[in-house]
Image (cartoon, helix red, strand yellow):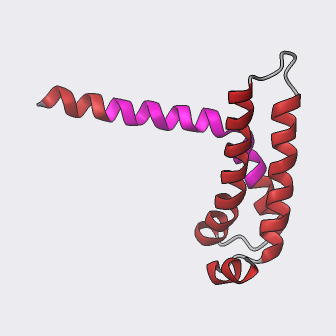
Amino acid sequence: MEEILKRLGVPIENWIVSIFAAVLIVFYRVYEPDEPLSKRKTIRVVIMGLSSALLVPGLVVYWAKVQNPFLAAVITGLSVYCFEPIMEKAKSKLMTKIDKTDGSN
């Protein structure tokens, strides 16, 4: 596993600290609400956190050229915490583009 991460060009420290930050935010998202989450929502939050923890450090290092593991962890934590609003905005933009192209046909 470590060899695969090294081939991606991301230091192992970035992955470790980012996964730790993602786990903390996932625990917060699962246990924070006054009303318990449904099983489906809990699984969705866990998958969202895991996918962000695996993707974001690599993207941050690749695009932003960030080598500081703590900055990568902060960005990972923010992406886990704000994942749903980000996806809603992306979905709305995509739907408006689809609606515009459908109207022209």
The residue lying toward the viewer, choosing from 46 and 64, is 46
Pinpoint residue 105: horizontal percent, then vertical percent: 11, 31
Pinpoint residue 84: horizontal percent, then vertical percent: 63, 34
Pinpoint residue 91: horizontal percent, then vertical percent: 46, 34
Predominant secondary structure, magenta span = helix
Q: Quadrant of residue 8?
A: bottom right
Q: Quadrant of residue 3?
A: bottom right
Residue at image coords 66%, 58%:
56
Magenta residue check for 96: yes
Q: Quadrant of residue 61?
A: bottom right
Residue at image coords 68%, 45%:
47
Horizontal arrangement in the rendering, residue 90 relative to residue 98 (left or right): right
The single residue placed furthest to the top in the displayed view is: 35
Magenta residue check for 22: no
Pinpoint residue 11: horizontal percent, then vertical percent: 76, 77
Residue at image coords 79%, 75%:
12
The residue lying toward the viewer, choosing from 12 and 93, is 12
Q: Which residues are magenta?
A: 76-97
Residue at image coords 74%, 39%:
81
- Which part of the image, by quadrant, shows the N terminus? bottom right
